[in-house]
Amino acid sequence: MPELDPAAVIEAVARDPRLRAFTGHGRIETLPGRQARRHLLLDKIAQAFEPGVRYPERRVSLFLGALHADYAALRRYLVDEEFLSRSDGLYWRSGGTVLPSPPDEPRAQALTTGP
């Protein structure tokens, strides 16, 4: 199962001038009140989740807790705004920006039909 790396998320948020003000001390200190900024922040967080992988709730909570003190609110926002879906204690990515794979990672093979 791919690692959920809180440091990479914090770094990505801190690099974005629209979100930088919400970080401090290596964490997300406050959640944006404006929906547009909150959506940007949630998208950055959702990018840490590998599409097609199901994560147990405990793992999601520990990851989100490393990002922000109120991990339950963060988890709720991710689900309510359809970045993550959940069922039977499992979470998976269901929205957000999907970045292209770096060149050193294997890419999915295209399916071909015919001879």
Image (cartoon, rainbow, N blue to C red):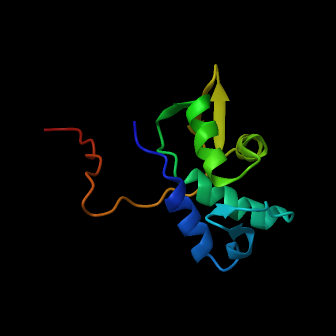
Q: Is residue 115 left or right of residue 102?
A: left
Residue 32 x/y as whole percent: 81, 64
Q: Is residue 58 left or right of residue 3?
A: right
- Residue at 24% x, 42% y is 112
Is residue 25 in sight in this rendering? yes
Q: Is residue 59 left or right of residue 53?
A: right
- Residue at 70% x, 72% y is 19
Number of marks drawn: 0
Residue 81 x/y as whole percent: 75, 47
Q: Quadrant of residue 21 in the image?
A: bottom right
| Farthest residue, direction bottom | 17
Is residue 95 in sight in this rendering? no
- Residue at 55% x, 60% y is 9
For the C terminus, give its image quadrant. Answer: top left
Q: Quadrant of residue 114 in the image?
A: top left
For the N terminus, give its image quadrant. Answer: top left
| Farthest residue, direction front | 25
Image height of 115 relative to 11, above or below: above
Seen from the viewer's position, the closer of residues 25 and 93 is 25
Seen from the viewer's position, the closer of residues 82 and 76 is 76
Q: Is residue 8 left or right of residue 57?
A: left
Residue 14 x/y as whole percent: 61, 72
| Farthest residue, direction left | 115
